[in-house]
Amino acid sequence: ERGVCRAADAVIAVSEADAAALSKLAPEKQIAVVPNGIFTAEYAQPSAQLNLGDSALLFTGTMNYRPNVDAVLWFTEQVLDRVRQAVPTARLFIVGNKPHPRLDAIRQRPDVEITGFVQDVAPFLHAATIYIAPLRMGSGTRLKLLQAMAVGCAIVSTSVGAQGIALQNGREAIIADDALSFAQAVIGLLNDAERRAQIGAAARQLAQTRYDWSAILPCLLKVYERLGFER
């Protein structure tokens, strides 16, 4: 990575954290930060209507990816029972292709549904009461979190899950890193529809103004322009 950075004419990172890491490898380089993004308008309306219940907790992602597997197992084993003690109707929906055999241990739980591959994740995002991102490992930017933000989901995430996205704790999401705090955050939002709406609206606004490709493209063009002038 050090060699590649030094050989390149320009180096672009998708987050400030990644830029800091690359700067340690090649301190002589000016690392540009251009975040990952999505077309937020594509998530404005679902392709189909779903009814997941009044207390649906949603996690999305490729489910043979180790950080995702770890996230849902940790949530199910350490958090979900705490949530259901306060909100007995709460159910976890795990949506994503290639479910790992390690998830077989939770398939039989009546409060967990593992869908496997779905053609379109948007209907699940629109039907969810809360989107959870209980990741404890991994790096980069979680595009699935940007999708949830674009829909206007109320989000509860760990710090790792929100890495690379400028979420303010208590404004666009609630950040919690231990099981008790995570459970309390989920319970609080399940019991407060107005608070869910506020957080979801703020998350949607952030996605549209900062992480839509229409906002990101000018940042990338500036890097290209700078590179052209340097040449």
Image (cartoon, grey):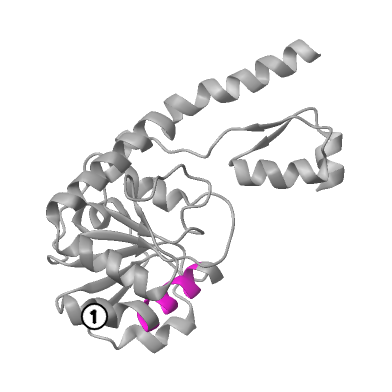
- Where is 32 relative to 148, above or below? above
Q: Nearer the viewer, residue 211 or 195?
A: 195
- Looking at the image, the residue that sits furthest to the top is 229
Identify which residue, 115 or 167, lies in the foreground. 167
Is 102 above or below relative to 2?
Answer: below
The dominant secondary structure in magenta is helix
Residue 106 appears at what percent x and percent y?
36, 85
Please tell me whether residue 137 belongs to the stretch shown in magenta.
no
Residue at image point 84% right, 33% down: 28
Residue at x-position 65% and y-position 22%: 223
Q: Position of residue 200 (x, y in %)?
A: 25, 46
Q: Which residues are magenta?
A: 68-77
Which quadrant is home to the C terminus?
top right
Q: Residues within 10 Å of mark 1 (few under 14, many from 20)?
A: some
Find residue 104 and report its horizontal and vertical position in percent: 41, 86
Q: Is residue 54 left or right of residue 36?
A: left
Q: Nearer the viewer, residue 166 or 73?
A: 166
Q: Which residue corresponds to mark 1? A: 111
Picture mark count: 1
Percent across and percent down for residue 66 are 55, 71
Please name the residue shown 80% across and 39% down the image: 5
